[in-house]
Image (cartoon, rainbow, N blue to C red):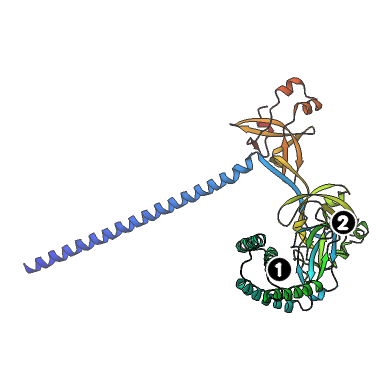
Amino acid sequence: MKGMIIKLKQHEKEILEEKQIEEKSTKKKRKVNKRMIIYIAIFLVIIYVIYTIYLLIKQPTDIFTLEEGTLYSEETDIGYVIRDELVIQGENYKNGMEKIKAEGEKVAVNEAVFRYYTKNEDSLKEKIAELDTKIQEAMQNETETENGLLKGDMVSLETQIDQKLLEIGNITDTTKLEEYKKEINELITKKANIAGDLSPQGSYLKELIEERKNYENELNSGAEYVNSSKSGVVSYKVDGLEEVLKPTEECFSTLTKEYLENLDLKTGKIVPTSEESGKIIDNTYCYIATISNTEESKNAQVGDKIRVRLPSGSEVSAEITYILEENDNDRVLILKIEKGVEELISYRKISFDLIWWSETGLKVPNQAIVKENDLAYVVRNRAGYLNKLLVKVKREGEKYSIVEPYDTDELKELGFSNEEIISYKKISLYDEVIINPDLTKVEN
């Protein structure tokens, strides 16, 4: 009996082990099936992505939507700036200078531009400042005058001084700041002079004011003012090339490629500010000398109108005024510009874009244009219906062209009949055109 029980337990154990093995096998098969499903799903996603990319790539090369665009024929060149500029300098340039006119400010003939300090200027200014303090203290101790007019003048001067002191807090330009300080000092001096006139002869205040006047006369008599001999724009950026690069034909004839390169200038470097001299620039025009060997430059002629894109990105009109031929097919071109001159005052050598031509209109790939009998056509796709449309090519670039429809007079000149002109279909903005069209599929 006992043996039978043992056998039954062993049999149950074997059955349990078989079930466990079967369950493991089932789980393994399920895992394999899940992996297969995942692999198939990934494969399908990859196929879908590849197909989508194919469609994205294929669509733009088959169909192109017309939009407004601009074509350029341009080149990036190095230019040397040539200006009509006059350097001005006095005798006492070693004393240091005080700018009366700021950088870029306009000046008239015989107007003071800057002045040189006197030899003892610092000492004299210090003495004047000390006297101003003493005068101010003495004025506070003086009794008010009974003269209404002079008293009113004092009040008016005090009001002006207070106003200037309020305004000076909002000024950031150093040159303007100096002007305000100068004006305030002049108002204080006037106020002190009035107080001195009101003071009795031999008074302490009158003695202080007389002493200040003597120092001020000494300061002014020793200063050397430098005036402008022509009208123009003031600049203190002096590089010593003002007499070398001059806007004359005699100078232009010497500006060879070798000569310009031997100037050894750095492109885009700002001309340093001089502490000894300034200059007056004619800001109505300047020239840019550049070296080019492109096909456009070889075909260029004096008098040609072009455009120039300056370092700031602004585009200005230019004219070729002089051409110097070189032995290695290079040409030195002298370009005259009349706008953007102030932008170039700080530079002598720049990088700029020379734009030979530009055209704006409907922009279409060259591969979408077909030629027949010296006429240009594009194939328009409108809801699957294809039309061959006659277009006028205004300008052809390397990859794109600018096109537009013909007008009635132009079609007549081409020999079209009235019926053909009436039925003429015009290309327009946002039309879709076929690239590399198959003309056998065109309806008309």
- Specify whether 61 is left or right of 31: right
User: How far is mark 1 from mark 2, CA to CA?
Assistant: 74 Å
Q: Quadrant of the N terminus?
A: bottom left
* Residue positioned 85% across, 70% down in the render: 90
Question: Residue 188 lies in what quarter of the image?
Answer: bottom right
Residue 119 % position (x, y): 79, 78
Q: Amino acid at mark 1?
A: Asp
Question: To which residue does mark 2 refer?
Answer: 331
What amino acid is at disc 2? Arg
Asked which quadrant contains residue 402, the reply is top right
Q: Earlier in the sequence, mark 1 or mark 2?
A: 1
Of residues 49 and 312, the one nearer the viewer is 312
Q: Would you name the residue on which mark 1 appears?
A: 197
- Residue 246 horizontal side relative to residue 206, left or right: right
Name the one closer to the observer, 309 or 227.
227
The quarter of the image holding the C terminus is: top right
Q: Is residue 3 above or below residue 71?
A: below
